[in-house]
Image (cartoon, helix red, strand yellow):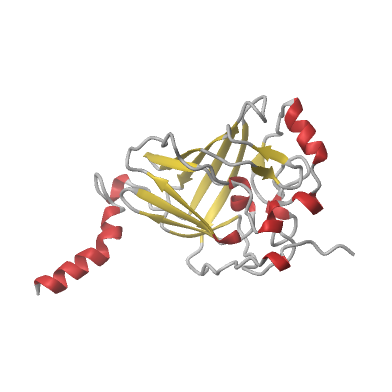
């Protein structure tokens, strides 16, 4: 009986931990699958590198084509030079099966799943099979973290909001249409605020980087809980990662 009980407790531990500390009422419940906007969206499958339509849903100036909002990026001269040299049909990171940035992972019209634990939140985007781990155990960013496209993320709760603070990025492209560069000095803050009924959350994203922006660049978008959707593998294949040009 003790063995069986131990197995049950071990299996249930992630769910129990997600409610600590302070009880379930103190932690907003983001567990589950979410989709931007009000409509459904095709899942999986490779077409253009961005998946469905323009890569990452970004407009020419970095504006969101889907529901939501984004301030116009104010960039440095060096960033503008990089943008002027950028060629979407050649330089898009999706050609090497990279989701390229936090913005693109959130902006692609495919599902996102959150899984909460006491010490971390696992954030999965269907697009390019992105998986991020946000540590919420009180640690600081490590000084020796290996830079990567999605950086090193720590987080905490502020009432109904999950705050995600990220540094430690590797060079990439934030906006894959306009070519806004991502550098090692980028700092990103995401704020996910759950609605009172728990069925939607508002995602606010702020970028700051002295190498790229002369002022913080912000965006926001609303996501709906979608228990009817199952996350599918993206399975990007390098040989198929390209645009069809007629």
Residue 73, picture quadrant: top right
Height in image: 35 above or below 173? below
| Residue drawn at point x = 77 percent, y = 38 percent | 83
How many labels were placed on the picture? 0
Residue at image location 82% in from the left, 37% down from the top: 84
**Split into 4 quadrants, where in the image is the C terminus?**
bottom right
Q: Residue 111 location in percent, x, y?
A: 56, 61
Pick whichever, 2 or 184, lies toward us. 184
Image coordinates of residue 9 in percent, x first then y, are: 20, 64
Residue 205, relative to residue 213: is it above or below? below
Q: Indicate left or right for 141 with 56 as reference.
A: left
Q: Choose between 138 and 20: the one closer to the eye.
A: 138
Can residue 162 be seen here? The reply is no
Instruction: Determine the residue positioned at 76% across, 49% down.
Output: 91
Vertical arrangement, residue 28 with respect to residue 45, above or below: above
- Residue 154 lies in quadrant: top left
Which residue lies at the image location 76% right of the left edge and 42% below the top edge?
178
Q: Is residue 68 left or right of residue 246?
A: left
Q: Image quadrant for the N terminus?
A: bottom left
Q: Is residue 232 visible?
A: yes
Against 80, residue 15 (above or below) is below
Q: Most extreme residue toward the left, as rendered?
A: 1
Q: Residue furthest right?
A: 246
Near-viewer residue (232 or 230): 232
**Which quadrant holds residue 236?**
bottom right
Residue 167: where, in percent of width, then height? Answer: 51, 37
């Amino acid at each position: 009986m003790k063995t069986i009980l131990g197995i049950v407790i071990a299996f249930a531990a992630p769910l129990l931990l997600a409610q600590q500390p302070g009880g379930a009422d103190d932690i907003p419940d983001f567990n589950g699958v979410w989709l931007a906007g009000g409509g459904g969206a095709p899942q999986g499958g490779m077409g253009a590198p961005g998946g469905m339509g323009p890569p990452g849903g970004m407009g020419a100036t970095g504006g969101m084509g889907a529901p939501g909002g984004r301030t116009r990026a104010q960039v440095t001269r060096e960033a503008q030079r990089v943008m002027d040299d950028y060629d979407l049909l050649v330089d898009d990171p999706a050609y090497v099966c990279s989701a390229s940035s936090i913005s693109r992972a959130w902006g692609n019209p495919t599902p996102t799943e959150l899984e909460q634990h006491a010490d971390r939140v696992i954030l999965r985007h269907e697009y390019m099979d992105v998986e991020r781990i946000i540590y919420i155990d009180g640690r600081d960013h490590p000084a020796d973290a290996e830079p990567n496209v999605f950086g090193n993320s720590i987080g905490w709760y502020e009432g109904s909001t999950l705050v995600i603070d990220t540094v430690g990025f590797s060079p990439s492209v934030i906006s894959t249409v306009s070519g806004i560069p991502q550098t090692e000095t980028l700092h990103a803050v995401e704020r996910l605020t759950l609605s009172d009924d728990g069925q939607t959350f508002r995602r606010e994203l702020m970028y700051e980087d002295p190498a790229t922006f002369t002022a913080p660049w912000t965006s926001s978008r609303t996501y709906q809980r979608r228990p009817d959707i199952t996350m599918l593998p993206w399975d990007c294949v390098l040989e198929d990662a390209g645009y069809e040009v007629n």
